[in-house]
Image (tube, rainbow, N blue to C red):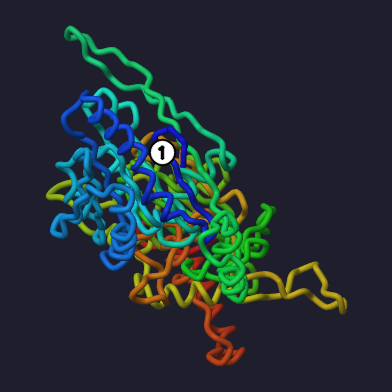
Amino acid sequence: MAFKGRYALIGGAAGGGKSDCLLYDPFRQVKVEQERVNRGEIVSSTGRAILFRRTMPELREVMDRARRTFELIDPGAKWHEQTKTWTLSCDYKFMFGQMEEDSDWIKYYSFEFTWAGFDELTTFTEDQFDQIDTRVRSSDPVLSKMLYVRAGTNPVGPGLEWVRRRFVEVAPPNTPVIRRIKTPVIQDGVTRYETVEREQIFIPARLFDNPSIDQKEYAATLTGKSAATRKALLEGDWYANTEGAWVGDDWDSSIHVCEPFKVPPGWPKFRMGDYGYSWPGLASIQWGATDPDGNITIYRSLTTVRQNAEMLAYRVKEIEMDAGEWDLDRHCSKLRGPLDSSCWNQTGAIGPTIAESFFNVGVIWDKCDKNRTAAAEQFRQRLVRRTAHATIKDENGKPAYIVPGIRWFNTCYSYVRSPRGAKVKVGPVVTIPVLPADENDPDVPDTHGNDHDWDAAAYGCMSRPIVAENDKVHPDELKERRKRQKDSERSVNKLGYPQGAW
């Protein structure tokens, strides 16, 4: 990677030589430093590189590779096992590190690095990446002009969404991108702002770019895998639904994401939400309607960051007033639905709860059923469920069974600002397809992933559960249940607000 900008990601197909690129890229700095020592410009180098893997077993594989080659590159190189550090002839330090826990970046907070690398970046969190980036600095006049952050990865893993967003989607492959950052400078007691440029690039990796492995044999191994794995690891497809994604092959964008249409007036509407404030604790509000077959169509969504409950409530009110979903006489929403039950907890010594803050604006919620395992099962049942389309016929002229148990309009996304100031695309059609599975319980999504949009939708599924075919009740009993539900939805609670959907 001869790129001289601050950030570079090499990623895509497996077997493309990404790890070797990372392992030897710091030697660009080492070469410069050794020449400076040889010329007598400096006594020893202050350069320091660190290469991260998420876990120690993964890191040992990289360290073993370094042991086989570093002394061939520099016979004077010395290895220190306790600190996992090579000291090269010019006194340049090459460290190896791991951050298995999300907060492990703090172990490196007192260091200064001139080069930082992440092998398999999608296994790290965005916060880990950003925190280590703040440690990449130098007061040396030469090294300060060649500070690098490098990463390699395949398009799989819990961090797929943020890595794709920050590196892959910003520009076409092999196209440098310059980010201009205004930074304050204080001189003679006066603060002024200067523009700092940071350049980055995404370099695609392909199996056939790496001559050091048996390409034919490795390609044959990948070709025999599932379509999702093949697309991700052989073709380097950043949008393939891999086995690492919780929804896996159950998600089909051509089915679960649809063009907007006018929601029929007879379809009961409701709202579902998951509240969060600080990044990455996003708040997700989704509006859904159920068709006569019980399928949910989510026709609108709002994903926000750094908005308190009252601010978010007024956003909801504004949206629903524009849509005719607000009762002007009662000064409240015509809709209600499930919200994270923790929003009823008292968060401080004084002041309203989150749910009360919504209520005070007229946005009414019900406590959700927060059984994550049951919610995951309900959600997956809806993903795989199919019912007949009202107008589309199959090849035999019969109704085509293509309507899923849950789907979203393709407009269900929002843009928010990350702590870095970047404009980030979020929302259910963006985050749910790539949400990883919990490594300890693959039947549920990983809580470390961006699961806020999924949580909101899952609360909605739990509020309108479906049953398996062999668990269905007698039609007469089902008819009676639906009658009782409709009677309940027509009722009004003691506060004068509508009960249930409208």
Q: Quadrant of residue 104?
A: bottom left
Q: Please indicate whether residue 428 sits to the left or right of residue 103 in the image.
A: right
Which is nearer the eye, 452 or 253?
253
**Secondary structure found at label 1:** strand
Q: Residue at x 44, y 29 (%)?
A: 179
User: Where residue 240 appears, x then y in whole percent?
Assistant: 58, 61
Determine whether 185 is above or below 368 in the image: above
Q: Amino acid at mark 1?
A: Tyr
Q: Is residue 88 visible?
A: yes
Determine whether 57 is above or below 161 in the image: below
Q: Residue at x 21, y 25 (%)?
A: 40
User: Where residue 378 appears, x then y in whole percent?
Assistant: 48, 75
User: Where residue 113 appears, x then y in whole percent?
Assistant: 24, 39
Other residues around mark 1 within 10 Å, as few (<14) / some (14–19) / many (≥20): many
Which is nearer the eye, 209 or 500?
209
Q: Please indicate whether residue 89 sits to the left or right of residue 234 in the image.
A: left
Q: Please indicate whether residue 460 sits to the left or right of residue 403 in the image.
A: left
Which is nearer the eye, 232 or 366?
232
Determine whether 495 is above or below 150 in the image: below
User: Where residue 387 appears, x then y in whole percent?
Assistant: 68, 75
Determine whether 175 is above or below 295 in the image: above
Q: Which residue is mark 1?
A: 7
Q: Quadrant of residue 98?
A: bottom left
Q: How many numbered marks does the figure carry? A: 1
Q: Is residue 497 visible?
A: no
Q: Quadrant of the C terminus?
A: bottom right
Q: Please indicate whether residue 26 sits to the left or right of residue 454 in the image.
A: left
Q: Residue at x 38, y 57 (%)?
A: 274
Which is nearer the eye, 430 or 225?
225
